[in-house]
C-alpha cells in the first residue's frame, strides 16, 4: 500500500487508479465504479446508460477507462455518446472510441489496453431486424470478453427455409445466443437442430396480449428443448453468459 | 301448430319433438336443449359434460337424440358414458353409440339420422401425444358437421424434420386446426409453410411460468403469420370454426 | 439463373428484382424484404411502419414496389406517408399511391400490377367508431388479397336494434371479421345470429381493469359460440386470415 | 339493562337473546354472531358455510334463530344441512327449515318470525343453467330482505331471440341482478334494453384464459352501459345490494 | 314521417333533428350520435372526449345540443372546451355552457331545455382530494339525470373521525357513490355504517403493486358489505347507475 | 473442541448437541437443523410442517429439542402432532408438549428450558374468526421469543364500533400485528387510530378476483398509513418481526 | 374556544392556526391539511407533490408551516421547490428551507420549530445508487420524526464482500430500512446477518419480466427471514414505520 | 436398408431397433419414442412420467432400452417405477435399474450400454432441502450425458456463512446449476462470487404472492449478474443445458 501511495505522490498513479487497486472501487461523482468485477466474476463492469445524465455517464466512463483501460457503456443515446467523446477528448485524448448508434453501446479503450483472447466461438442469432438492439449488445460484450463472435441474422421461422439454411453456421459455434420477439419460437427450433448450448434472448417486440416480450419469454421457458433463458431485452446478460461459457470452453477448470 | 298438437295427441310426435319444433327448445330436467342451434348458426348443439351429473348428461343426451336424431356429448367421463348407454338402451335401443375414451366424447345417432356431407377437407394437426384430447374433440365435431377430416399427428417442431415431412399433407386441406402445448410454436411454423387458413389450438400442457397453455396461447396470438386462435383446450370451438369454414368452402354464399 | 443475370446485365431487370427472383429476398438498407411470401403462404408481405424511420419505410416500400409491383405499409403516420410519396415520385413516378389517414395504411401499385381477384365476400364489422383503425387495416389487406370486402359499421350491442337490423348483410358474407373494444360482446352476438365463420378482433379501447383490449380478448376467447380470435388490434392478422378463407372458398383444394 | 337481566333470571329470555340485545352480539363456540347487523346496515347477518364444520354451522344457525328469529346459511353442503336440521329438531323443534340443495342455501325461521315486506320488484336473470347457484343465492337473500323477486332464466345472448323475448319482464322490475359466466355479455345487452338499474353478477364458469369468471368480470367492468358489478359468484352481495335498492324504492329517504 | 319531412322542408326542423326523430341517430362528421339513448335506457348520451380531436368534440356537441337540447361532454381538456364554446357561439349563441375545469366535463343547454326532476337524493362521497375527477363526473351526470346530488368530501378512513362525523349526512341519501383510491377502504367502512345502497368507485391513484386503482378495485370487490362496484375511474358509470336508482326511487315501477 | 468430544465420549453430550455446538448445525435424516439461528438473527429456528412426512417432522422436532431445549413446529396436522408426541414420549419423556389444533402449531420444551423474557408488549389483532390461523402462528412465535402477547380479536371494520371500542387496548402495545382477509382494511384503520408500529398480515380468505389474500395484500401495500406488510398467511414472519421489535424496545442497542 | 377566537380577533393567531387547533384541519385552496395527524398517529403530515401544481404545493406548504411549524414535501420537482421558496420568502421569510434535489424532498421549518428527539438509531441501507431516491425519502422522514439516522450505502450482494464488511454498522442500529431494486436480495441477506428488525423497501428499477420493482417486492415477501415490507418505492412509508419503531424503542409503552 | 430388414428377418434386430435405425423413431402403444434425439441435439430422449399411466411408462421405457440401451424416466411415482421394473424383469431381465424415490427419476441400462464420458465438471447446488427434487433431476441427466457431477447442498443465503464456505467447491466446476425457491437469491449471490457460468433453477416452494416459484423466477431474471435461467422446477432442462456446456468444454468445436 505504501508503494501505491508513493506512486500517487509521484504522479505515477492517479488517485482513482490507486483507490481501485486498494479497494476494488473507484469513487466518482456519479457513484462507485466496480473496477474489480472482471477479476472476481469474469465479467467486465459496464456503465448502464439508462437513468443517468450525459454528464454522469461521461464521468463514469472516464473513470472506467482510467482504472481498467476500457470503458463499456450500454443503452447510451446520442447525447450520452457526445458527452463521453467530449470528456475523453480532454481526459484521454489518445483513447479509441467505438459507438454503435443502432445497438446503443459505446466502448472506449486506452492505447495499451489488451482485450482478452478466448479461443471459442459465440454465435449471435436473430429472427429479424427488430432483434438488432439486444443482439448487438450481446455480441459486443461477448467480443469484449474475448470470444470469437459470429452474427447469423434474419433466420426467423415464419420463413423456415432461412432457418434450415443456416444450420451449418449454427452448428459451428461453441455456444449460441438466439434473439427473438413476438412468439419467440426461433430458439426452440434452433435448439432442436443443433447440439450446441443455446441461450434464448426474448425481445420486447409485439403488442396486445403477451406483448413487450412476455409471450417470447414464456414460450422460451416452456420450450421442450434444452434452452436456458435471460430476461426480455437482456442482451448484456445473454452475452456475458455466452462469454463465460466461451472462457470455460477455452480454459476448462474442473478435473484439471 | 294445430297439426303439431294433433300429431302429439295421435302419438306421432313426442312432446319434446313438438316443443322443439315450436320453440326451438326442448325442456329437460337438466335444462333447456337448444334444438334449433344448428339451423340458426350451423353448429350442432352439444352437451358439455363438465359440471353435470351422469344422470343429467343422460337426460340431455336422450332429448338431443329424440329431437335432432343425434346426441353429441363432450368432456364426458366413463361414468357419464355408462349412464348415457344405459339410458339409451331403454329410450332408444336402436341408436348407435360411439364413445372415444381418450378424447372424452360420445356421439349417439338414430338409425335414420343422416350426417350432413360437406365437400371440403379439415386437417387436424398435433405437435405430440399430449395434444390428443382437444384435437380429438376438434376432429369429432368437424366430422359431425360433415367435413372430411384428416389427422396429421406428432409433427412438433422440436424435431423439425417431422414437420417438414408433413408439408404435402398439410397443403392438401381446406383449413387446418393445429394443436400445440408448451411453447405452442407449431401453428406458426405450419402457417409459414402453407397458404391454407390455420386455426391455432393451444393445449394446457406445460408447468411453471406460462404453464396451463398460457404460453402457447400468447405465442399464437403474437404469431407473425396469419393465424387465428381459440382458447386453451377449446377443441370444440376450433373444430366448429373449421367446420363452418368447410361448409362455406363447399357452398359459397356471397356473390351468388 | 444465367438468364436472370443476363437480364440484369441488359438492364431489363433491376438487381433487386433479380435477387428476389433468385432467393425470394431483396436486401435493402432497412432489412430484407420477403418478396416470396405471397407465393409461399398466400399473404402479401407488408411493411410494418411501427418502429421504423420515415426513410426506412420509404426504402422498403420502393423495394416492395420494384419487386412485387405493390407496396403495402401498415401503421404509417403522416411523416412516413410523405416520405414514401417523395421517394416514389422519383423512383416510380407512374405508381398509384393510396393513403388512408385514419386507418394508417398506404398502398402503392405499379401501373401494370394486377390485384388477384377472389370470388368470395369478406364482411368487416365494427361495434363503433373507435374500432375504425384495426377494422380499416383488416379491410385493406383482405381487399389486397382480392376478396370482395363489405363494411358493416356501428352495430354495437349497447343499442341492440342496430345489431339485429344488420343481420341480412351479415348473413350474406362468406366470412366475417368483427371488431369490438371495451367488453367485446359484438362477435359473440353476431356469431349467434349467423352461420358464417366469424373472426373476433379485439380493440384496445377501454380503461382500468381489463382495459387496452384485455377484456375484449378474454371475452372473445370465452365465447360460447364458434369464434376464432386474433390479438388485440391485430387487424392485419384478422384480414389476412379472412383473405385466406376467401381464397379457399373461391378455389377449394381438398377433395379435388 | 336491569330488566333484561331479570328477564334472563326469570327464564323469559335466553342468555344469548340478552347478550345480543345488550351488545348486538351473541357469542357462540364457533365465533360471534352479529345480531344487530340488519338494524345497522339493512342486511340480515348470514352464516357462510365455507370453511366451517357442520357442527359449527349448526351452532351458529341455532344462535341466529334464537336471537333474530331466523337463520340464513349460504354455501352449505348436504352434511351441513343435515347437522342444522338435527340441531334445530332439538333446540327449536317448531322452526321451519327450507334448504335449496342446488343453490346451497338454508333458511330456518321461528313460528313467529315475520319477514319484512318491501313493496318493490327485484328481477334475478340468468344466461344459462350454469348460473343457477349464484343467482339462487341472490334471489334468496333479496326475498329474505322482503323484496318481490322474479326469476327470468335462460336468456343468454348466444340465442338472442330469447333475450329479446324477455324484454317486457325485464322492464317490469325495479332493479335487476343479471348473472352470466364465460364472456359475461348478458348484463350489457340487458342494460342496453331497459332503463332499470342493472347489477352484473359474473359467474365462475369458463376455462383457459379468462376462465373462472375473470373474463365475465372484466367484461362487465368495461361495459359501455350503466352497470355496476359484484365479484365473481358473489350472489349474496348482488342480492343484498338489490334488496337495499328495493327497500329504498319502497321507502325513499332523502328529500322527506 | 311525412310531417317530419314537411317540417324540414319548411325549415321548422333541421335535418339532424329529423334524422334523429326518425332513426334515433344523427349522423355527424365524427360519427353517429345516439339521440334516442335516454328514452331507451334512461341515460343521456354523452360525448367521451378521450381520443377525439377538439373539432370532432365540437361537432358532436353541436349535434347533441341541436337534437336533444343538451350536450354532455366528459374527459374534455381546455382545447376541447374552447372548441365547443367557439362552435356553439356560432351555431347556438343562446346556449348556456358550463365547464368544470377540474372534473373535465362540459354541459351545454338550449334555453328551452328542461332537465328532468327526480325526487331522490344521491350522495357523492370522496376519501380525499385526489378522488375529485371521477367523483365530479359522477355528480354531474346524476344531476343531469335529475337527481338531487350532495357532495360529502374528504372523509377518508386514515382519519376515522372524519368518516364517523359524516354518518348523518351519509344516512340521509337514497343512494351513495363512494370514491376512493389507494387501498379503497372507504366504501366498505361507509357501507358498514349505513343501510343505503352504496356504489364503490375505485380511483386510479396509488403506485407500485396494486397501483392505478387495481388494489382499490379488488378491495371493493372483496368487501364483506353489500357493495356494488364500477371500473377504475368510471365516474360516469357510477353516476348513471346512481341516477337510475334515484329515478326508480322517485317513480317505482314494479307492483304498480 | 477437545472438551466437547470428551463430553460426547463420556456420554455427557449427545453427538447432535456436540455437532450443533461445533458447527451450528445438527444433521438429521430429514435435513440439517439450524440450531444457531436464534443466536445469529434473534429468531428461533422452527420446523415447517408443510411438505414433510410425519416421521420427518418428528425426527427434526426431536433434534431441535435435544440441541436447543425447544422444538417449534408450524403448519402441522393431527398426524404430524401424533408422530411428534409418540417420538418424544420415547426420546424425551419429560418434555412438555403444547399443540394448538386450530392454529396448527406445536411447541415442545425440555424441563430445564427457559424461554427468554422480553419486557415489551405485542398485540395480535384479528378482523374476524377466519384470521385465526395466521394470527395464532404470529402470537405463538412472538411469545416464544419472550414478548408479552395480547390477543385483540373480532374487531373488523364492517362493524366499525367494535374497532373503535378496541382503541385503548390497541394503544397500550409496543407493536401490533393486524391480520385481515377479504379487502384487508383493518390494518389501515388501526394504523390511523394509534401511534404504535403496525405490521399488516393479509389472510387468504376471499374468492373471485383478488381472492386468496391478493386484495388484502395489495390494499395493505397501498395503505396511506405507516404500515409494513408480510406475505399472505405469513403469520410466522409477522410474529418474528414483532418479536424482534419487542426485543429492541426492551433492550435498545444504538446510541448506547 | 372563546379564547382561540379572541386570539384570532387580536391577531395573535392566524385563522388557519385557530381552525387547525379547533378541528385538527386547516382548509387551503388545494385541499385540507391534516395538522393533527402527528398527535394522533405519530407521523407528521406531509405534502405529496405528485399530481399537484407548483402553486398548490406552495399553498399547502405555507399552511403546514403556519399551523405546525414545519412543512414536509415529498416527490417535489424543481418547479415545485421554486414555488415553495417564492411563497415562503413572502409569507414566512425567516423559515429555513432544505431541498434535496436528488431524493426530491423539501423541508421548511419555522425559527422556533423544535424537531422531536428520539433516542434510537435507524439505519437506511442501499444496494446501489439507483436506490437513492426512496432511501433518501425514508431517511428524511425518519430524521424529521426525531430518529438518529445512519446511511449505509452501496452494499449490494452482487459484490458480497461489501455486504459482509458492513455487518458491524448494520448491527449497531435499532431498526433497518433496506432498499433494493432488480431481484431485491439485499434485505434477505442483511436479515440473515443481524438480529435487528429489517424493513424491506423494493425499488422500481429493472425491466422486462418482474421489472418496475415487482420482482424485488415478491422476493422480499417470499424471504425466509423475518422481514416486513412496504410497497415499491414507498420510502416515506418505510421511513415512518422505522420512525415509529424508533419512538417505541426510545419510549416503550406496554408493561409500564 | 436391405441389411436392416434382413437382420430383422434373421431375428438379429428387433422391429423397434430397425424402425428406429431407419426413421429415428420407434412406435409404441403410448406414442413415438425419439430414438435419434441424442445424435441430433446431444440430449438423450427421456420419458416424462407426468400424465401417463404406469403401463404407458413401462411400455415406453422398454422401447427406449431396446433401441438406445438406456431408459430415462423423470417425474415417475412408485406405481410407475414398479410397472417399469415388472416390465423389464420380463423383457430385459439383465438390465440394471436405478430408481431415485426422492427426485422421482428412474434409469435403466442394458448390460452393454456405455454412458458417454465427458471430461468436465457440473456443480449442482441447492439452497435447502426443498430444492432436492429438481436438483436431483438436473444432476441425474447431466450425469447421464457423461459429465462429472458434484452436489453442493444446503448453502442458502439466509445463513450466509454456509454460502461463503462453499466458494472453493463452487469455483472448481466448469458450470453450475443453482436451485433455489422462495425469493431465489442464491444464484445471484453465487454468480457474484465465481467466474463460472451459472444456470438459475427456480423451485416451486413458497406461498402467497410470488409463490409457486414465480418470485424466484422473476428474481433470477432480474439478477444483475450474468445468469441464465430455466422455468420453475425445470431440473431436466437445467441439467441438459449444463450437460451440453460440459460437452462443449470437453470437446470444443469452433475455431478447430
Image: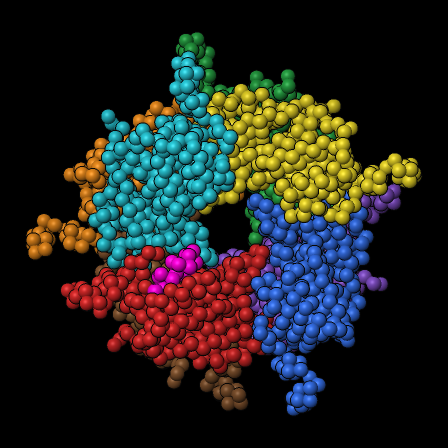
Chain colours: A green, B blue, C purple, D red, E brown, F cyan, G orange, H yellow
Q: Is residue A75 left or right of residue B8?
A: left
Give me the residue at 42% from left, 53% from top.
Answer: F205
Q: Position of residue C96 (x, y in %)?
A: 70, 59
Observer able to see residue H35: no
Q: Is residue E90 left or right of residue A156?
A: left
Tell me if residue A232 comes above or below residue A81 in the rendering. below
Q: Quadrant of the N terminus of chain D?
A: bottom left
Q: Position of residue C176 (x, y in %)?
A: 66, 67
Give me the residue at 53% from left, 41% from top.
Answer: H204
Tell me if residue B135 comes above or below residue B34 in the rendering. above
Tell me if residue E126 comes above or below residue B91 in the rendering. above
Give me the residue at 33% from left, 53% from top.
Answer: F127
Which is nearer the eye, E54 or C86? E54
Give me the residue at 62% from left, 55% from top.
Answer: B232
Q: Is residue D55 magenta?
A: yes
Which is nearer the eye, C244 or C22? C244
Observer able to see residue A12: yes
- How many discs mark residues in the rendered view? 0
Q: Position of residue H239 (x, y in %)?
A: 63, 33
Q: Position of residue H41 (x, y in %)?
A: 72, 35
Which is nearer the eye, A207 or H94? H94
Q: Quadrant of the C terminus of chain D?
A: bottom left
Q: Is residue C174 magenta?
A: no
Instruction: Magenta stretch: give its range.
Output: D48-62
- Dominant SS in magenta: helix
Tell me if residue G151 comes above or below residue B217 in the rendering. above
Amino acid at each position: 500500500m505504501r508503494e501505491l501511495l508513493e506512486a500517487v505522490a509521484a504522479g505515477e498513479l492517479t488517485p482513482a487508479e490507486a483507490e481501485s487497486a486498494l479497494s476494488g472501487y473507484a469513487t466518482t461523482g456519479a457513484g462507485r465504479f466496480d473496477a474489480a468485477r472482471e477479476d472476481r466474476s469474469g465479467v467486465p463492469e459496464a456503465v448502464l446508460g439508462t437513468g443517468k445524465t450525459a454528464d454522469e455517464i461521461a464521468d463514469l466512463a472516464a473513470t472506467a477507462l482510467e482504472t481498467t483501460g476500457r470503458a463499456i457503456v450500454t443503452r447510451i443515446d446520442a447525447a450520452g455518446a457526445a458527452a463521453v467523446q467530449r470528456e475523453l477528448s480532454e481526459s484521454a485524448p489518445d483513447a479509441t472510441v467505438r459507438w454503435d448508434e443502432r445497438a446503443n453501446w459505446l466502448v472506449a479503450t486506452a492505447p495499451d489496453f489488451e482485450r482478452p483472447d478466448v479461443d471459442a466461438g459465440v454465435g449471435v442469432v436473430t429472427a429479424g431486424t427488430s432483434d438488432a438492439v439486444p443482439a448487438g449488445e450481446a455480441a459486443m460484450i461477448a467480443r469484449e470478453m474475448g470470444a470469437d463472435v459470429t452474427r447469423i441474422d434474419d433466420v426467423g421461422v415464419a420463413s423456415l427455409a432461412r432457418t434450415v439454411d443456416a444450420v451449418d453456421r449454427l452448428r459451428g459455434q461453441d455456444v449460441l445466443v438466439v434473439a427473438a420477439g413476438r412468439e419467440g419460437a426461433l430458439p426452440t427450433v434452433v435448439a432442436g437442430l443443433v447440439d450446441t448450448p443455446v441461450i434464448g434472448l426474448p425481445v420486447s417486440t409485439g403488442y396486445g396480449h403477451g406483448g413487450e416480450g412476455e409471450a417470447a419469454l414464456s414460450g422460451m421457458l416452456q420450450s421442450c428443448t434444452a434452452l436456458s433463458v435471460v430476461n426480455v431485452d437482456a442482451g448484456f446478460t445473454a452475452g456475458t453468459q455466452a462469454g463465460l461459457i466461451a472462457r470455460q470452453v477455452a480454459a476448462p477448470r474442473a478435473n484439471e
